[in-house]
Image: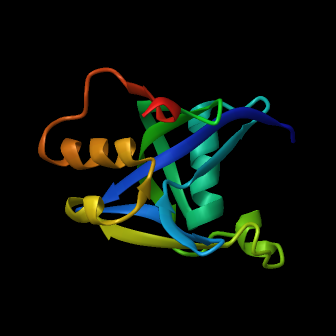
Amino acid sequence: MAKTACRAAAIILQDGQIALMRREKLGRLYYVFPGGRQENGETGEQAAEREAEEELGLRVAAGRLVARTWFRGREQRYYLCAVTGGQFGSGQGPEFTRPFDPQYGTYQPVWLPVHALHTYPVLPQRVAELVQTAQYQSWPAQPVVFDEETE
């Protein structure tokens, strides 16, 4: 199925923790929100749900859009998601099934404590900050929009 330019990602919170992908690529360690490019005919919510299952092994129900960013000219949408089933760490997406290539690096699903997100290299940083703030306050009424390339 063809892909679109938009990336959809899942924000999955459970028991004070957040599900992220630990990445090591070309000597660099960082964490990202599970997600990927939206396929043609797929909504952003459907893409976030599919990617969470492929990368984490979790079935989720995507809720509201909480953030929109742009990175390298590509829109990224972040959805709050609730776990509905599956087994964490059992993802079978292409990240786990293709032969290892240093160009792509490694992928490992992890749970990190939300209160300590600021101590990890989570990308995009502004979305991680939004998640941390929302832990103590409420989520903004409208999605937060920012351009990573100008910050």
Write the residue at 65% across / 30% down: 73
Q: Is residue 101 left or right of residue 31?
A: right
Q: Farthest residue toward the bottom?
A: 100
Q: Nearer the viewer, residue 82 or 119?
A: 119
Q: Nearer the viewer, residue 41 or 70?
A: 70
Q: Farthest residue toward the front?
A: 150
Horizontal and vertical percent for residue 35? 59, 50
Image position of 80 with respect to 108: above or below: above
Image position of 147 with respect to 130: above or below: above
Q: Nearer the viewer, residue 118 or 113?
A: 118
Q: Quadrant of residue 107?
A: bottom right
Look at the image and tell me whether residue 68 can be seen.
yes
Image position of 14 with respect to 146: above or below: below
Horizontal and vertical percent for residue 3? 80, 38
Horizontal and vertical percent for residue 21? 52, 65
Quadrant of image for the C terminus: top left
Look at the image and tell me whether residue 15 can be seen.
no
Q: Is residue 4 left or right of residue 65?
A: right
Write the residue at 66% across / 72% down: 26
Q: Is residue 92 left or right of residue 33?
A: right
Q: Farthest residue toward the left?
A: 136
Quadrant of image for the N terminus: top right
Write the residue at 19% across / 48% down: 135
